Image: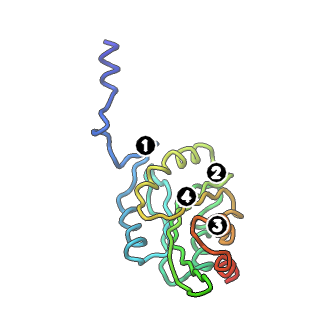
């Protein structure tokens, strides 16, 4: 009898739901459709996702009317990345690269994992357990960035921490920070 119970609990890998993460939090399919609008169609500048009603959902999005520091300020606003909460975000970052000969524009998608230090432990645990599976579903992300307090959410902090991964020359980085 005990052997039957053990065998009954095993579920073949191919029968597990692909939409449910290791934490058991399912992803709303609209998240990936909205992400496609940012990545492929360039209709959005940023998107904020979060766990709501035991499901990862899109919570806010910003259009392409703003760029750089101004768009980042809207993205990291307390309404979108609230204190005491956890969120995932993607941001389409415009990069101006000046190598001394040519100046060219490029864009990179940055994945932000906002897990405020003041968030409840259970919220942080569910958020952390769901991150990898959710992140793997977002093709085309160039850089992952972790922020745990408001100072780490600043535009300058993100650029300085991720300049090497974004392949931004120092002169271009200084120009982006000062603008």
The residue that appears at 29% across and 17% down in the rendered structure is 4
Residue identifier under label 2: 119
The residues tagged by marks 3 and 2 sit, at their Cα atoms, a distance apart of 21 Å
Residue 23, horizontal then vertical, whole percent: 46, 42
Q: Circle 4 sits in a helix, a strand or a loop, which is it? A: strand
Q: Is residue 110 left or right of residue 155?
A: left
The residues tagged by marks 1 and 4 sit, at their Cα atoms, a distance apart of 17 Å
In terms of depth relative to the viewer, which is nearer, 51 or 75? 75
The quadrant holding residue 72 is bottom right
The residue that appears at 68% across and 52% down in the rendered structure is 117
Structural crowding at the residue carrying mark 3, measured as other residues with C-alpha within 10 Å and reported as few (<14), some (14–19) or many (≥20): some
Residue 34 position (above or below residue 171): above
- On residue 158, the disc is 3
Q: Is residue 128 left or right of residue 9?
A: right
Residue identifier under label 1: 24
The residues tagged by marks 3 and 4 sit, at their Cα atoms, a distance apart of 16 Å
Q: Circle 1 sits in a helix, a strand or a loop, which is it? A: loop
Residue identifier under label 4: 87
Q: Circle 2 sits in a helix, a strand or a loop, which is it? A: loop
Q: Which circle's residue, 3 or 2, is located before the other in the chain?
A: 2
Q: Which circle's residue, 2 or 1, is located before the other in the chain?
A: 1
The residues tagged by marks 2 and 1 sit, at their Cα atoms, a distance apart of 20 Å
Q: Which circle's residue, 3 or 1, is located before the other in the chain?
A: 1
């Amino acid at each position: 009898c005990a052997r039957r119970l053990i065998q009954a609990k095993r579920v073949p890998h191919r029968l597990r739901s692909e939409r449910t993460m290791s934490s058991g939090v399912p992803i709303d399919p609209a998240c990936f459709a909205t992400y496609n609008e940012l990545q492929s169609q360039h209709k959005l500048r940023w998107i904020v996702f979060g766990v709501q009603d035991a499901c990862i959902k899109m919570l806010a999005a910003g259009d392409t009317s703003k760029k750089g520091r101004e768009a980042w300020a809207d993205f990291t606003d307390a309404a979108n990345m609230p204190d005491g909460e956890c969120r995932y975000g993607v941001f389409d970052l415009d990069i101006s690269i000046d190598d001394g000969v040519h100046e060219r524009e490029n864009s990179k998608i940055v994945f932000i994992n906002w897990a405020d230090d003041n968030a409840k432990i259970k919220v942080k645990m569910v958020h952390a357990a769901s991150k990898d599976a959710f992140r793997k579903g977002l093709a085309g992300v160039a850089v992952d960035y972790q922020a745990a307090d408001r100072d780490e959410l600043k535009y300058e902090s993100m650029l300085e921490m991720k300049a090497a991964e974004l392949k931004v020359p120092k002169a271009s980085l200084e120009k982006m920070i000062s603008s």
